[in-house]
Amino acid sequence: MKNIVVLDGYALNPGDLDWGPLQALGNVTIYDRTPAYQVPERAKDAAIILTNKAIVNAAAIAQLPGLEYIGVMATGYNVVDIAAATARHIKVTNVPAYGTPAVAQLTFALMLELYNQVGLHAASVRAGDWARSADFSYWKAPLHELQGKVLGIVGLGQIGQAVARIALAFGMRVIASHRHPERDKIEGVVFTDLATCFAKADVVSLHCPLNEQNRGFVNAALLNTMQPGAILINTSRGPLINENDLAAALNSGRIAGAALDVLSVEPPSASHPLVTAKNCIITPHIAWASIEARRRLLHTVVNNVKAYLQGQPHNLING
């Protein structure tokens, strides 16, 4: 049986899922977390390594002569040097689309939190404000409805499409900036260019992959085109946003709010400008982490390994 090393298993399975199906496929060693410098030592005898966010760079690959296969336990695979792996004929796989329902759901949880301020009002009641109130009802911030608002989606892939369908069910009008409008048409969604998407939307939600062309594209110039009452949602990748520019736009009141599940560095420093920015909600990269999504993820990871061992690899990045 081949040696299989899981470099950072804790995020996927902190104890509420079963590694048994993977352990049935080989001699499995599971580490909770592995910094990049420890990858060569921990994986020195491995034919198969599995990683979520642990970095498998060219230097590590060069020190692993027995490595045959790298399984990324996520959709994004920028943690692996694909060119170095390919040069060594090492197969690399990922897990597409496992988190679509979970990410779409959190997108609306964040949107609704900014529009309804549920957390703020629940905390107020717990603090005794309602018990002391002279009135049967009060609100500590403006409350808004989604119906009739314009949602601008940047990236109408599988997650963007799921978000669009939910938005349409809420009675929102949906516009989208997307690279393949002819391929991904949805009834009720109007395609437009990026500038129009930001300028016309009440809510802009990012659902595009990160690449060198769009890194930091949400910057001061683009934020300044948004309506003053608009909000920005990001459940995609943190580096899509110039975070200093967004913090400035929030603190100056240039836009009304932002809700982010991802940041450019995770975990962030305590002094990160968005942690203390006005009207900014930040969650710790949890959109992917419903137990249902993680169960689907682990199931596909195991099936990817099994398919590779059977000589018929699935979900190849470098096939």
Image: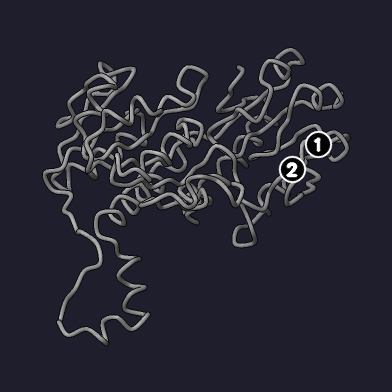
Instruction: Tell me where residue 8 appears, x and y as whole percent.
Output: 70, 46
Instruction: Tell me where residue 177 appears, x and y as whole percent.
Output: 28, 24
Q: Nearer the viewer, residue 92 or 267?
A: 267
* Residue behind mark 1: 39
How is colour applied across the structure in the image?
one colour
* Residue behind mark 2: 7
User: On the picture, is 91 further left or further right than 66?
Assistant: left
Q: Residue at x 11, y 44 (%)?
A: 148
Mark number, residue 198 = none
User: On the picture, is 123 further left or further right than 299?
Assistant: left
Q: In the rendered structure, which amino acid carries the disc numbered 1?
A: Val
Q: Residue at x 62, y 42 (%)?
A: 302
Instruction: Please tell me whether residue 221 is drawn above or below residue 162 in the rendered image.
Output: above
Quarter of the rendering occupied by the N terminus = top right
Q: Nearer the viewer, residue 281 or 284?
A: 281
- For the image, the number of numbered tags is 2
Earlier along the polypeptide chain: callout 1 or callout 2? Answer: 2
User: On the picture, is 66 further left or further right than 144?
Assistant: right
User: How dense is the environment of label 1, judged by Cα within 10 Å: few (below 14), some, or many (20 and up)?
Assistant: many
Q: Residue at x 44, y 37 (%)?
A: 236
Label 1 close to label 2 by CB (< 8 Å): yes
